[in-house]
Amino acid sequence: MSDLHSRSSVRQNVPFMRLWTARIFSTTAFQMLSIVIGWQMYALTDSAFQLGLVGLAQFLPMLLLTLPAGHVADRFDRRTIVYICQLLEAAVVIVLLIGSLQHWLDPLHILIGAAVLGGCRTFEAPASAALVPDLVEKEQLPYAAAWSASAGQTAMIVGPALGGVLLALGTAYAYGASLAALLLSAVLVFFVKVTRFVKKSDAVGMDSFLSGLRFVFKRKIILGTISLDLFAVLLGGATALLPIFADEVLQTGPWGLGLLRAAPAVGALAVSVVLTRVSMQNSIGRMLFGSLAVFALATVLFGVSTNIWLSLFALFLIGASDVVSVVIRSTLVQINTPQEMQGRVNAVNSLFIGTSNQLGEFESGTLAGLFGAVPATVIGGMGTLVVAVLWMFLFPMLRDLKTYEIDER
């Protein structure tokens, strides 16, 4: 299949575009919910510790349920899993909305709601990721990954902004908009037609649960890809310190913080749109490690900058370079994983990504507490660069990769 035909076929693939649109709605809803739940918890408790518990409540279900979620995604219809999870998320939002309107919602209810939402997202994420190869041809996967990245970055821009505006009107408006977005997403997913799902049929047991982990550690190309994401994001978490930079370093206040938060998503969205039209089929390894080098150096630049416009440029580069590596990594995982293993392998990938994001924020905060925000960011950027160089030698197959598909059998 020609490159031009692959690119145009993705746009003309109705089931995939329905899933893509659904992802924009569902991710936007999740972003709005993160804003309103966090604000409501802090308004009720005036406690940073309680606010931190919201993140923990969402993270623990992912830690405990990721492997079973991958098993479920390979055993049952992935489309059904996604829209059932979104309907359950909508039910949680209805409870939070009613509790807010009737004024009986307390911190415990919020934590329970956050935990249920986290559990639903844990099952939804690998099923949704594994659904993509069920909908598009293998040659179309790089473009599909770029389209998926653009959906996520669009939601990252629209969700927080819309959530903040609606929250100013009242929590009920923010919850109501999140509910509408989730229901629209569920309807779209319901009408996605799947034609290539390969159902897993082996016996249920611990061996099956752990098979995704064994597959990842057996395939060096996938292990290198996933572990590179884990350690690179773990060390390069400059965005977790944006409130400190806006207040103490750049002295811009809330308006500057809004711009700083939007800049990486704008960069990522711009490049992901380009990648839906431009193929990355040659020297994949060089592009991957090159994008990580830009990510690391842009992080260092942001750390040392005292000018708002230079900082915005650095964050734009962080988002732009990150989405290149995201598209390459996700495509490598999907192309080099058999259809019947997609759910379990994507679950392991989700666990690594989620862990790196959560621990990355913790690492950045800890270093900032010890050395200050600027040294912590510079150290993180240099650490990411060291990881990229180290991985080039640990995984030479990944470094020298020319095309996406590798035969390691």
Image: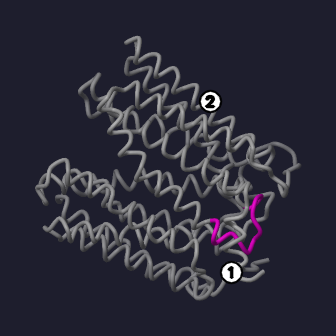
**Residue 89 shown left or right of residue 252 in the figure:** right
Q: What kind of element bears circle 2?
A: helix
The answer to whether residue 136 is magenta is yes
Residue at 55 percent across and 43 percent down: it is 26
At which x and y percent is residue 294?
37, 78
- Write down the residue under mark 1: 4
Crowding at mark 2 (Cα within 10 Å: few <14, some 14-19, many 20+): some
Relative vertical location of residue 287 with respect to residue 117 in this rendering, above or below: below
**Total marks in image:** 2
Crowding at mark 1 (Cα within 10 Å: few <14, some 14-19, many 20+): few
Amino acid type at image mark 2: Leu
In the image, the segment drawn in magenta is 133-144
**Reading the chain from its start, which is encountered first: label 1 or label 2?**
1
Residue at 68 percent across and 72 percent down: it is 8
- Write down the residue under mark 2: 88
Amino acid type at image mark 1: Leu
The answer to whether residue 366 is magenta is no
Q: Looking at the magenta stretch, what is its main secondary structure?
A: helix
At which x and y percent is residue 282?
61, 88
Q: Kindly tell me whether residue 154 is visible in this rendering.
A: yes
